[in-house]
């Protein structure tokens, strides 16, 4: 009996099956099992870290241009020298618990360290300390919004429920540098031993967009918790989608393709492109080779960004190939209820809940909400500003919108100019609230808000109204004088005034400019919005 030969026409429907593995380098001062400095820590310009979690080293050796010298962040434990023993980093465990709790995970009361054995040049011990059957975090779930046409979060649409199988803690390997000529490679062990949280999801994704949305949200969560800077160009987060599909054939057969794991993606764009590519290619691969999902069928591939294709690296090992066994040099980790709840107190309001609140209560768009939440310090500064204004009896909706505009426009511009986040500009929440208050009360113009915020950045103790007065930013509030200026301009520019009376409201801009000029000649400043309202009323076009 001859074997059935299938063609593309025989594939009636393809169901994507996609899971994710995400590696997050935790930003502790020292490494996972040693006192060596951690390259994923948020190093300051001095390249010092002070006291380590385990107590010790504080220098990060740098070259002539400030880059970290290869193989300088090492010690006997990292190098696997005889007699060197590991010591667990408690801060890394607590950071992992924070992420696990934020993802709705259970925290294991008992977890342990295992040795995952494999040989590679950047792994001096020939094994990696990881967690196998008793991970620290497990059985979580997270709601993920979709993406809009611009790649931002669509907070009003349906959300994908993504299960978290586990989040286990391990140490990172080093890396091979192939940048030199002559075909030589350099083994750089600076990254070896960095605490690495591996988050493994259920195969709940059915599109590349869902994968990217999850990755973006996870990065925001980890950054908001302060466990990583999330700079993907530095490898702080690496994405590894596991992609296969279920094909429904015309003759009733259901075929599942082998899982392809694509390694070490460090951008959202690459993640999306890889998932889309694999979902396109896998039906064709099955038609060509007939391979289906089964034991030993999983493969590891890399992403060739220049060609836009995945390339085979190796057949994927099964768990037994790594010869896992408990690490005899490290104790079991016991997490009691008290420790777990103390860590839970540090979770706070998560980015998605915060974005939902800003859209609902502040009237901002989803994109604006995401911009406010991108830096946790900026979101907290914004909340303090709004709370201070609301405490004065002001409407939350009105002041929340204006405070958001101040931070998103003037604040973001200044932050970009100075190379810092908005919350690091230096002005206080009280000063920000005072700027909004002055604008609400009509004492400054919209343009003056930008200048005034810059002044506050350089004088964090300054009284905002006094600063505005010294720079001549306070508006003239003599209503009778304003009407006299408006009447004078209407008389001087009868033709333009006639256009406005006839319904050409755009022409009022020329009159506004003339009124502002008269105020300036008299040594005063007026609000263009207030001038417009008076002019339109005098010309019979007021609402």
Image (spheres, rainbow, N blue to C red):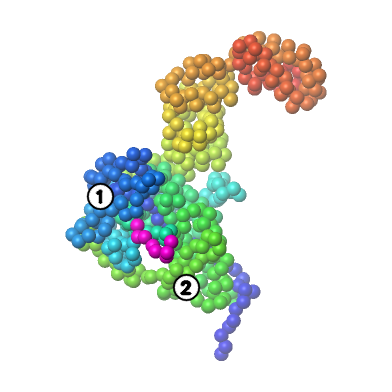
Comparing 7 with 302, the one in front is 302
Q: Residues within 10 Å of mark 1 (few under 14, many from 20)?
A: many
Residue lying furthest left: 83
Q: Position of residue 496 (x, y in %)?
A: 78, 20
Comparing 247 with 64, the one in front is 64
Q: Which residue is mark 1?
A: 35
Residue name at image x 30 percent, y 51 percent: 73
Residue name at image x 42 percent, y 59 percent: 180
Q: Is residue 145 left or right of residue 520?
A: left
Q: Is residue 451 left or right of residue 8?
A: left
Q: Quadrant of the C terminus?
A: top right
Q: Describe the element under mark 2 as helix, strand or loop.
A: loop
Looking at marks 2 and 1 on the same chain, the residue that comes earlier in the sequence is marked by 1
Q: What range is drawn magenta here?
A: 181-188
Compute the Cα span from label 2 to label 1: 44 Å
Q: Quadrant of the N terminus?
A: bottom right
Q: In this picture, is 156 found above or below 454?
A: below
| Tag in front: 2 or 1 | 1
Q: Main secondary structure of the magenta part?
A: loop
Q: Which residue is mark 2?
A: 293
Residue name at image x 51 percent, y 42 percent: 370
Q: Which of the 4 image quadrants contains residue 409?
A: top right
Q: In this picture, is 214 found above or below 384?
A: below
In the rendered image, is residue 17 in sight? no
Question: Is residue 185 magenta-colored?
Answer: yes
Comparing 10 with 493, the one in front is 493
Question: Is residue 3 magenta-colored?
Answer: no
């Amino acid at each position: 009996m001859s074997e059935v030969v299938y063609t593309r026409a025989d594939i009636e429907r393809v169901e994507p099956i996609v899971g994710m593995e995400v590696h997050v380098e935790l930003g502790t001062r020292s490494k996972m099992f040693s006192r060596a400095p951690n390259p994923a820590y948020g190093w300051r310009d001095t390249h010092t870290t002070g006291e380590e979690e385990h107590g010790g080293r504080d220098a990060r050796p740098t070259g002539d241009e400030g880059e970290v010298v290869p193989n300088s962040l090492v010690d006997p434990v990292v190098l696997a020298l005889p007699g060197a023993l590991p010591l667990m980093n408690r801060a890394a465990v607590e950071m992992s618990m924070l992420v696990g709790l934020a993802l709705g995970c259970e925290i294991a009361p008992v977890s342990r360290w295992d040795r995952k054995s494999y040989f590679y040049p950047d792994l001096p011990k020939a094994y990696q300390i990881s967690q196998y059957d008793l991970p620290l975090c497990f059985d979580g779930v997270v709601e993920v919004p979709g993406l809009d046409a611009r790649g931002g979060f669509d907070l009003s649409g349906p959300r994908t429920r993504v299960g978290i199988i586990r989040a286990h803690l391990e140490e990172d390997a080093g890396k091979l540098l192939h940048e030199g000529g002559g075909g030589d490679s350099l083994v750089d062990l600076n990254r070896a031993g960095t605490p690495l949280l591996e988050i493994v999801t259920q195969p709940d994704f059915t599109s590349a967009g869902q994968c990217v949305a999850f990755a973006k949200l996870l990065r925001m969560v980890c950054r908001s918790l302060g466990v990583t800077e999330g700079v993907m160009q530095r490898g702080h987060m690496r994405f590894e989608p596991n992609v296969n599909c279920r094909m429904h054939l015309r003759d009733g057969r259901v075929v599942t393709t082998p899982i392809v794991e694509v390694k070490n993606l460090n951008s959202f764009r690459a993640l999306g492109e890889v998932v889309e590519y694999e979902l396109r290619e896998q039906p064709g691969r099955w038609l060509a080779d007939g391979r289906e999902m089964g034991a030993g069928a999983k493969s590891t591939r890399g992403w060739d960004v220049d060609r836009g294709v995945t390339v085979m690296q190796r057949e994927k090992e099964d768990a037994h190939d790594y010869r896992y066994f408990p690490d005899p040099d490290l104790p079991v980790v016991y997490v009691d209820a008290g420790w777990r709840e103390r860590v839970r107190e540090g979770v706070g309001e998560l980015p998605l809940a915060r974005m939902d609140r800003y859209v609902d209560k502040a009237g901002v768009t989803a994109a604006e909400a995401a911009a406010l939440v991108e830096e946790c310090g900026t979101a907290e500064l914004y909340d303090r500003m709004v709370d201070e204004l609301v405490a004065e009896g002001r409407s939350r909706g009105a002041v929340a919108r204006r405070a958001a505009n101040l931070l998103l426009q003037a604040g973001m511009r200044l932050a970009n100019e100075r190379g810092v986040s908005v919350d690091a500009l230096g002005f206080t929440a009280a000063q920000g609230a005072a700027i909004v208050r002055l604008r609400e009360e009509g004492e400054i113009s919209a343009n003056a808000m930008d200048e005034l915020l810059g002044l506050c950045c350089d004088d964090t103790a300054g009284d905002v109204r006094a600063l505005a007065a010294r720079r001549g930013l306070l508006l003239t509030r003599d209503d009778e004088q304003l009407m006299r200026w408006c009447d004078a301009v209407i008389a001087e520019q009868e033709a333009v005034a006639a256009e406005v009376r006839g319904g050409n409201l755009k022409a009022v801009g020329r009159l506004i400019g003339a009124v502002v000029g008269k105020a300036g000649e008299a040594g005063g400043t007026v609000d263009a919005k207030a001038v417009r309202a008076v002019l339109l009323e005098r010309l019979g076009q007021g609402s």
